[in-house]
Image (cartoon, rainbow, N blue to C red):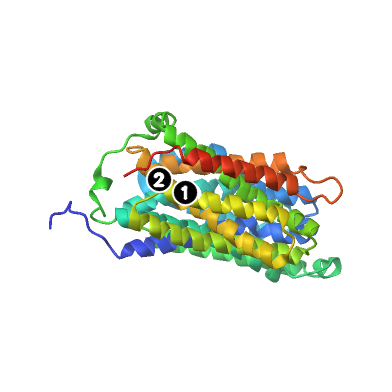
Amino acid sequence: MTETEPKIYGYRWVVLILFMLVNMVLQILWIGFATVTTAAQLFYGVEELSIYLLSLVFMVVYIPVTFIASWILDKYDFKIGTIIGTLFIAVCGFLRIFSVGSYDLVLLFQIGIAIGQPFMLNSITKLSANWFEPSERTTATGIALISVFLGTAMGLFITPFIVGGVNLIEILNNFPNFQNMLNVYGILSLSLGIIYIIFIKNKPPTPPSREVTVEKVLMFEGLKKLFSNFNFWILIITFLIGLGIFNTILTFIEGIVIPKGHYSAFAGLFGLLILLGGIIGSLIMSIISDKYKKRKILLNISVIIATISLLGISFTKDPILLGLLGFIFGFGLISASPVSLEYAVDATKPVPEATSNGILMMVGQIGGILFILGLEDLKLPISEDYFPALILQTILLAIVFILILLIKEEE
């Protein structure tokens, strides 16, 4: 065997697990305040909107930083890029411990964590390309993305138990518990950051396939190629609408279920079912994509599942049916992400993976901002039901389905 002959290394799974753990912590740090908004308001002495900003800032920061992150990942490769991101996440996540009573400090540290986010999310397909053979890449991308949704689910589910408090009196008496939340997540982020930096490797001694050795264009040249690619433009619209809808549903989840006659606790369960469906869907669709080498048909299946289930969510009030439809919706919408990202890599060669990955993720963040701000008041006048917003989003998903029919299947 020659040095340049492709070879697969078992350490690829160690790299993937390390990467997943950091991404899970990143999502916990992002979404944690959302489920303890009242306690956070009292702890920092601010309005509700200020607590929402602690999460929304991640979408805003992503837009300018994504270009820097993609350039560093393309020029200095996976290890350097993700270590930079991990340092921001680990250090700023730890420093939140010292933000007691200071909203300005916690906002500053949230911005620091948000800076690290594009370095991690933009490198998902680069990890797959550096370490995995072609027949495993969509699966690896899907597993890496699953960590994002697992972290979000854990942040939604675990944080209220750490903070405690189900009414105002209990919340006022549980400030130490809120500090405990900052302590637990801070120590966790710093510990995992140190482990990641020690054990992460850039790429194996020999590449997993001959494709890795093909010379790629630089980021700025790659951007020109991306924006002259018809198929990539359809993916841009897909991520703009798809991730925009995903972020909107999670943000307005209480406003969606409460007018249907359910309590806030059901909103949390509904959100978890969406994420659980997405995790399972991502894994299944990724494995099928790698086995049969098909992207387009799987994207269409995912989007039509999401469209039909969202239409059902718009009309139904039954809790069991609503939960089932939430699971199916997550299965369809979220499972499109890994398949889309790997399709983008295939359809835009020799553009670096981090460039196509980064642009799509950035567009998704823009979609989240636009949809959240644009649909906030699109409710029925008396019940304040988000029915009109849900119907509009269903129509947009149907348009995405039609657009995907126009793309070319990459061999």
Q: Is residue 365 visible?
A: no
- For label 2, the crowd category at 10 Å Cα-Cα, with few meaning under 14, some 14 to 19 and many 20 or more, is many
Residue 92, image x, y percentages: 58, 54
- Give how far across and how far down residue 164 sits, in percent: 74, 70
Q: Taking the image as drawn, is residue 403 in sight?
A: yes
In the drawing, does residue 389 fall left or right of residue 144? right
The N terminus, quarter of image? bottom left
Q: Amino acid at mark 1?
A: Leu
Residue with the mark numbered 1: 299
Query: What residue is shown at x 74% (from left), y 69% (from top)?
Result: 176
The quadrant the C terminus occupies is top left
Q: Amino acid at mark 2?
A: Tyr
* Depicted 74 relative to depicted 204: above or below: above
Residue in view at x 66 percent, y 47 percent: 56
How far apart marks 2 and 1 lie (CA) works out to 10 Å
Element class at badge 1: helix
Residue 395 position within the rendered picture, expressed as x and y whole percent measured from the top left: 63, 42
Q: Residues within 10 Å of mark 1 (few under 14, many from 20)?
A: many
Looking at the image, which residue is at 78% across and 59% down? 260
**Disc on the earlier residue, 2 or 1:** 1
Residue at left 78%, top 42%? Answer: 377
Instruction: Mark 2 and mark 1 in contact? Answer it, CB < 8 Å.
Output: yes
Using the image as rendered, state which of residue 231 and residue 321 is in the foreground: 321
Looking at the rendered image, the disc whose residue lies closer to the viewer, 2 or 1, is 1
Number of on-image labels = 2
Q: Which mark is residue 67?
A: none
Q: Position of residue 213 (x, y in %)?
A: 24, 45
The residue singled out by tag 2 in the image is 343
Is 383 in front, or is 254? 383
Q: Secondary structure at mark 2?
A: helix
